[in-house]
Image (tube, grey):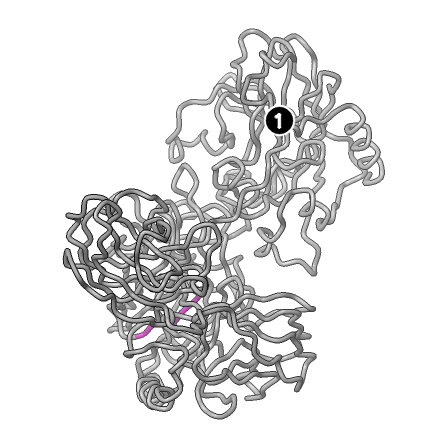
Amino acid sequence: MLIDNFRIHKHSWIIISLLFQIQKISSQGTGGPQDGGPYQGKFIGKMNSYHHQVSGEIHAVDDTTFLLTNFNYDGNGADTFFWAGASNRPGPLGFIVPNEYGKTNILSRYYNKDFTLKLPDGKKITEIKWLAVYDLSSQNTFGDIYVPEDFDPPATQRISQLTRKAHGVTSGPIQVLDAKTLLLPEFSYDGGGKSTYFWVGVGPQPSSKGFKVPDEYGYLDPIRPYLRESVKLELPGELTIFDIDWFSVFDIDTKENFGSVIIPDGLNVPPSLVKIVPHKNSLPNCVQLHKEYRMSWEVFGPQITIELAAQVDENDYMAFGISGSPTRAQMIGSDVAIAYIDGYRGFANDYNVTAKAPCIKVLGQYKGVCRDELLGGLDDNQMHTAVRANGINTITYRRSLIPNSDPGDKEIPTDREIQLIWALGVLNDEKEPSFHDLYPRGSLSINLGRKEAENNCFAFTRSTAEPKKPWDISHILDQNIRLFTATLGPSGGKRGYHGMTGMASPGFSWYINGYLAPELYLKRGLRYTFEVRGGNDPHSPEAYHPLIITDEPHGGIDRNQNARTRKRKEARVLAGVQFSTRGQARPTAAGPLCLARHSTERDRRRDDDFTDFKKFNRSLIYKCDKDQEPGMLEITPNSSWPDTVYYNSFTHSNVGWKIHVVDSFTLSAVGGSQRSATLGICLSTYIALIISYLYLF
């Protein structure tokens, strides 16, 4: 059902767009593309050329910024700058405009170059009369352009609020921030629709002949409930505000408009800074899974060819496969491919999911997200091509529609729809998938054997916005603290454990004294005790986490005991493990499970919305086994311990973080890098933590 709407008018979109451009052309005197090309801001004019081959076109991006396109200058001026002023014509009364790098250097050669110039010191375009290429030593103008009188530069435009029709849809006046971005202030929707999306299209009023707009996180799932939230939306692919007539909250099942607004013609808005990254499919069918991810396919004979393409980092993976349930999206029991590129080589490995945890051996059997070979099957995916270009990984592989004798492989029917799942995430240091960052909450149902080709994919886009800052790492630096409580909790998205430590997380992490993976400071010769509440059920891949301390950052030494995963150096285990006469490691510090969880109202895909761990932690619900005593790990660091060791999980990798082993608690001993740390936990803070734990238990 998610893709049924996209079957509408694949080819008629071209006709609609052409008719729409004819309709719009008479109303673009104040805004919109001037020549059918990409919108670059409000056109001012072509630069007047006098000397040194100066030429180019000038647009206003906003009230302080010019965009110069196809700009040329031979670079032969002696003392030449971009120069602006408020006099009647260019002359010595003016000021230097910094170049595209923000520098006031003498201009070098330009050849058909596009770039922006920002006026200095908060000056505005409306305060000047001209922009010139001017030589200060000879006081000659090599080229100039005059700003028209009463010039109105592009700016954010406020339009009407959403009409109130159904399901509590309301908003403040919608803001068009730029040519591709809408802001819905105070937006509300009760979530009661069947299949409701942000929806845009052309024509006099909203209709089913429209197109989905990804939500604020890039998902194309039916939208969630909102309550007076500011929602920023980016129009998909190459679509701009000048290509649409209306915006709606629309249910494609019932064809009902819950609330909408008409987009005025010729809005004088800034151009979008989003870069369009076109990507051509090699297969006839394509479905857009997320703003950053698409899947193409073709069925031929007894096989299906699948192409996965995503805008991801080099160490990311793409997951795609058949759901573990025939009626909904379900991770347990699913048959998935984990696709990634390692150097110049591509992989599309065949996995089976038996638990929501990385693959580990439980009582002699592998459980979790495991390769088929470990579960007694075969890797039936046939790798075809793998390319990384323009920040996009594209991997093509083939598999049989009907599996052979592999019990983990699922059949792909061609006569009906099938439930599919997908995800994007980071590979750990063993090139195994860690917990996924992007994944759908709703179901994805597609008939992969349909006769008519289907393609609803759009171009990738790339924002210039800076990534969100990781949360600060807490430092427990107090010589009076000798007792630590180790519990488990969610790792907190890209701003959490992954951003703080730089390591891929399995989705959960150690919480020490209530803090997510803090750095601990221990003194040699002193005895310390860890109360461990990480789970003591060896039958469960999710709930068995004895605490260990090693000299390497990853942990999970139980995984490293079999030859398949020995890709790291041999770890030195300092505490938490005893070895049998055969060298088999056995944990000594396992305790009952105390786990922080997201509330049922929270979506963990939105963890990065929290600006710090403190606010994130307040949103969690703690559930602890109160009937069992915690596991105990007592340690006394000595001179044989390295200066930096790591607390971690015996079973899973990348769950903990650093312990600094010091000879004293002086500033020089703990290191100059920590002298400015303000996150040390004093005794009074720790007492407060004890009180909070007494409340929990």
**Residue 620 seen in the current view:** yes
Q: Which of 472 and 193 is in front in this view?
A: 472
Q: Where is residue 79 in the image (x, y as percent from the top left)?
A: 23, 44
Left or right: residue 556 versus residue 14 is right
Left or right: residue 592 versus residue 63 is right
Q: Would you call the spot at circle 1 few (<14 residues within 10 Å), some (14-19), or many (20 or more)? A: few
Query: Which image quarter: residue 399?
Result: bottom left
Q: Where is residue 491 in the image (x, y as percent from the top left)?
A: 59, 43
Principal SS element in the magenta part?
A: strand
Q: Name the residue under label 1.
A: 677
Q: Which of 129 and 485 is in front in this view?
A: 129
Give the residue type that dot 1 points to: Ala
Q: Where is residue 247 in the image (x, y as percent from the top left)?
A: 52, 80
- Residue at 32%, 54% in the rendered image: 83
- Residue at 19%, 58% in the rendered image: 72
Q: Does the magenta stretch include residue 287?
A: yes
Q: Which of 154 and 227 is in front in this view?
A: 154
Q: Where is residue 258 in the image (x, y as percent from the top left)?
A: 62, 84
Q: Does the magenta stretch include residue 478?
A: no
- Residue at 62%, 45% in the rendered image: 490
Screen quadrant of the C terminus: top right
Query: Which image quarter: residue 9?
Result: bottom left
User: For the magenta stretch, what is the residue range?
Assistant: 285-289
In this rendering, is residue 129 above or below 425? below
The residue tagged with tag 1: helix, strand or loop?
Answer: loop
